């Protein structure tokens, strides 16, 4: 495994862990925030999904700039 592949694998594992834990706790967070404001709970859900896709968009931009 080359150092570049290793760092990509480590980054993928970290992203998987972060978003996996976020998705696991999302229902609890939504219920807690939903007790205060249902609009705020919806905004949090949209931000979570948006952050997930934003990571891949930023990675694609970075790779395009490096010429990969």
Image: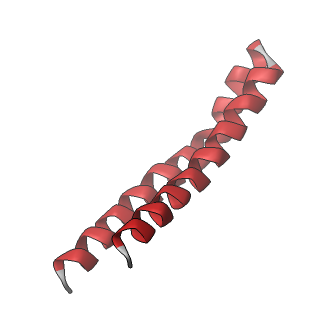
Residue 18 lies left or right of residue 28; in this view the side is left
Query: 36 above or below 62?
Result: above
In the rendered structure, the answer to whether residue 55 lies left or right of residue 2 reads: right
* 9 w.r.t. 54: above or below: below
Q: Position of residue 28 (x, y in %)?
A: 65, 34
Furthest toward the left, the residue is 3
- In the image, residue 38 sits, relative to residue 36, either above or below, namely below
The location of residue 42, given as percent across then percent down, is: 78, 31
* 34 and 60: which is toward the camera: 60
Of 1 and 30, the residue lying toward us: 1
At x 48%, y 56%, the residue is 58
Residue found at the far right of this picture: 38
Residue at the spot x=43%, y=57% of the render? 15
Query: Number of labelled discs?
Result: 0
Identify the residue at horizontal 49%, vertical 66% (top origin). Answer: 60
Image-based side of 48 in relation to 64, left or right: right
The image quadrant where one finds the N terminus is bottom left
Q: Is residue 63 left or right of residue 47?
A: left
- Residue 24 visible in the shown view: no
Q: Quarter of the image containing the C terminus?
A: bottom left
Measuring from the top left, give residue 27's x and y in whole percent.
69, 39
- Can the viewer see residue 55? yes
């Amino acid at each position: 495994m080359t150092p570049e592949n290793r760092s990509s694998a480590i980054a993928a594992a970290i992203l998987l862990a972060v978003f996996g834990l976020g998705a696991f706790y999302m229902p609890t967070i939504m219920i807690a925030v939903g007790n205060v404001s249902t609009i705020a709970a919806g905004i949090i859900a949209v931000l979570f999904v948006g952050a997930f896709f934003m990571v891949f968009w930023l990675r694609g931009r970075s790779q395009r700039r490096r010429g990969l």
